[in-house]
Image: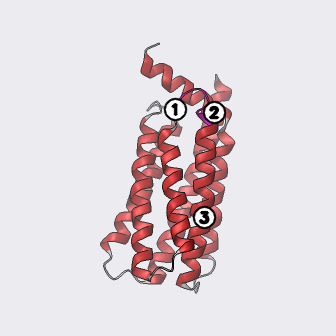
Amino acid sequence: MTNGRATHHILLTTLGKNWWMVGARGLLAILLGLAVLLRPGLAFNLLIATFGVYAVLDGAWAIASALWVSRISFAMWPVLFEGVVSLGVGWMALGWPLVPRDAVRAIAIWGLLTGVLELIAAARLPRGRAGFWLLLTGGMFSLFLALLILMLPQAVEPAVARAVGVYALLFGALLVAAAGSLRKGLQAR
């Protein structure tokens, strides 16, 4: 096995054994999506607080899962850095009173950074596997959310809330599907 293939094998095996960690992040995102979409009149400051709690929990879980999975090698560094970004943006959303424009920019920057890191994480997996395509799609969704928010110069609060809610549901579903794919791939070995 070449070094790249060996890394892919180790990464897939380790992720497969810890599929539930990926699934837990997906369930957390789904909960965020439901919390935002089921409360259409949610005040913008509560939306930012809800997003902040999600980002802190997701970031902490991403860091923990990256460190847990990377006990053998530092193969999960994109997920580790994604967790650091989420944790930082989450603390910022919870700790500093942001005006709506700044909060929207913070969510957009979070989407850009995490999207790029998710794409890097997906690129480290073999391309023929469903897990690769699901994680790649999740990264694309993160980038799409960020670009959508950045392209709306007059981003109104209900539109941002809907965008975040729909993104969270889709992203969460993709992570849950990726977790199932990783688990199935491990069982097939």
User: Which one is earlier in the sequence, the residue at label 2 or at label 3?
Assistant: 2
Task: Residue at the far front: name it.
Answer: 95
Q: Label 2: few (<14), some or many (≥20) within 10 Å?
A: many
Q: How far apart are marks 2 and 3 (CA)?
A: 25 Å
Q: Is mark 2 on a helix, strand or loop?
A: helix
Residue under pointer 1: 74
Q: In this view, does 166 lie to the left or right of 26?
A: left
Q: Which of 137 and 3 is in front in this view?
A: 3
Residue 103 quadrant:
bottom left
Magenta-colored span: 69-73
Vertical arrangement, residue 39 with respect to residue 107, above or below: below
Q: Label 1: few (<14), some or many (≥20) within 10 Å?
A: few
Residue type at the position of mark 1: Phe
Give the residue displayed 45% in from the left and 47% down from the top: 118
Q: Position of residue 135 (x, y in %)?
A: 49, 45
Q: Position of residue 57 (x, y in %)?
A: 63, 59
Q: What element carries label 1?
A: loop
Residue under pointer 2: 16
Q: Which mark is residue 51?
A: none
Give the residue displayed 63% in from the left and 51% down from the top: 61
Residue under pointer 3: 54
Is there a contact, CB below 8 Å, between mark 1 and mark 3? no
Q: Does the image show residue 134?
A: no
Q: How is the image coloured?
A: secondary structure
Vertical arrangement, residue 159 with respect to residue 176, above or below: below
Task: Residue at the far top: name it.
Answer: 1
User: Which one is earlier in the sequence, the residue at label 1 or at label 3?
Assistant: 3
Residue type at the position of mark 3: Tyr
Q: In this view, does 3 lie to the left or right of 176?
A: left
In the image, is residue 71 part of the stretch drawn in magenta?
yes
Q: How far apart are marks 1 and 2 (CA)?
A: 16 Å
Residue 114 quadrant:
bottom left
